[in-house]
Image (spheres, grey):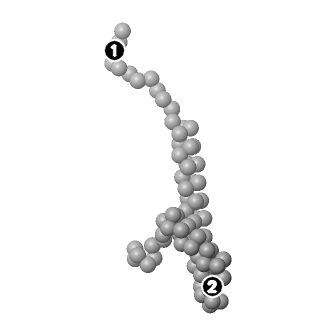
Amino acid sequence: MKAKDAKPSFEDALTKLEAIVESMEAGDVPLADLLAKFEEGNHLLKTCESRLKSAELKIEELKKSKDRISFSKFETGDED
């Protein structure tokens, strides 16, 4: 996979998104750059949402598998 195509980690995407929001709120961004930042921010937001959803699903899977684990008596081989 090319580095250009790789999605950033959740933390990296969130940090970039926060920086974009701060620069947009500062009001120092020209309109053309503002639109580009908005598009990038929207893409980063979708990445963050996707990563969060994946994490939630993984947690649910782990909780379900934990509930299915059953313990059986350990056989020692002693026949007393």
Q: Residue 1 placed where, x, y %?
A: 40, 74
Q: Residue 29 placed where, x, y %?
A: 62, 85
Query: Which quadrant of the view contains residue 37?
Result: bottom right
Residue that badge 1 annotates: 78
Q: Is residue 3 left or right of residue 39?
A: left
Q: Is residue 39 left or right of residue 1?
A: right
Query: Which quadrant of the view contains residue 44?
Result: bottom right
Q: Residue furthest left?
A: 77
Which one is nearer the viewer's eye here, 63 or 37? 37
- Secondary structure at badge 1 equals loop
- Secondary structure at badge 2 equals loop
Give the answer, above or below, for where 25 lies relative to 54: below
Viewer-side label of 2, 1: 2
For image coordinates 51% across by 32% down, the residue present is 70
Q: Residue 15 placed where, x, y %?
A: 53, 68
Query: Which quadrant of the view contains residue 47?
Result: bottom right
Give the answer, above or below, for where 76 lies relative to 80: below
Q: Earlier in the sequence, mark 2 or mark 1?
A: 2
Picture disc at residue 59: none
User: What amino acid is labelled 1 in the image?
Assistant: Asp
For image coordinates 57% across by 43% down, the residue present is 64
Residue that badge 2 annotates: 28
For image coordinates 56% across by 73% down, the residue present is 19
Quarter that holds the C terminus: top left
Q: Residue furthest top?
A: 80
Query: Can the viewer see residue 11?
Result: yes
Give the answer, above or below, for where 78 lies relative to 22: above
User: What amino acid is labelled 2 in the image?
Assistant: Asp
